[in-house]
Image (tube, rainbow, N blue to C red):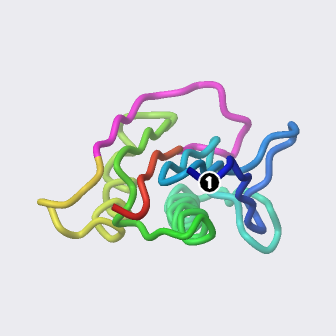
Amino acid sequence: MEKRRSIEVPGVKHVNPIPAACRRGPFVTTGAISGADIDTGKVPEDLDAQCAAMFANVRRLIEAAGGTTDDIVKMTVWITDRALRPVLNKYWVEMFPDPHSRPARHTTTSSDFMPPMQVQCDFLAVIGE
């Protein structure tokens, strides 16, 4: 099994000394992925723009790890208000259009975000089966 390696992509940064994602063998897991803009690193005010950027960051991370979104088996999403789920679900269905082949997902509310952040996620993937 290959050694553990850190995965980094521009625009997905953490303040603490932790990588955006980690791969060991076929397994990839991430830290928190926000909807920060890839060029500015800033989180947009608009939830729609945050979700679009968050899912783009998910795609960029899994591809940097050597996989595709088809390799994602579980996502956890934190959102400030359950009433915002329709916006989140719009991007979920875009990334995972086949209802018979979607990762598991748990969505929960969080009041711990610094405004304007309204959504974050993480994922677990298995590559190369």
Residue neighbourhood size for the residue with mark 1, other residues' Cα within 10 Å, grouped as few (<14), some (14–19), many (≥20): few
Seen at 59% across and 64% down, the residue is 65
* Type of amino acid at the residue the image marks with label 1: Glu
The vertical placement of 112 against 61, above or below, is above
Seen at 59% across and 70% down, the residue is 60
Seen at 71% across and 52% down, the residue is 5
Provide the secondary structure element on which disc 1 rests: loop
- Residue 107 left/right relative to 38: left
Quadrant of the rendering where the C terminus is positioned: bottom left
Q: Residue furthest front?
A: 1
Q: Is residue 95 magenta-colored?
A: no
Q: Residue furthest left?
A: 100
| Place of residue 125 in the rendered image (x, y in percent of width and height, measured from the top left) | 44, 52
User: Front-most of 118 and 22?
Assistant: 22
| Place of residue 33 in the rendered image (x, y in percent of width and height, measured from the top left) | 62, 49
| Place of residue 96 in the rendered image (x, y in percent of width and height, measured from the top left) | 29, 65
How many numbered marks have been drawn onto this rendered protein structure?
Answer: 1
| Quarter occupied by residue 29 | top right
Q: Is residue 117 magenta-colored?
A: yes
- Residue 11 left/right relative to 101: right
For label 1, the residue is 2
Write down the region rendered in magenta: 104-121
The vertical placement of 76 against 23, above or below, is above
The vertical placement of 95 against 107, above or below, is below
The vertical placement of 18 against 53, above or below, is above
Q: Residue furthest top?
A: 111
Seen at 86% across and 37% down, the residue is 16
| Place of residue 113 in the rendered image (x, y in percent of width and height, measured from the top left) | 67, 33
User: Front-most of 65 and 51?
Assistant: 65
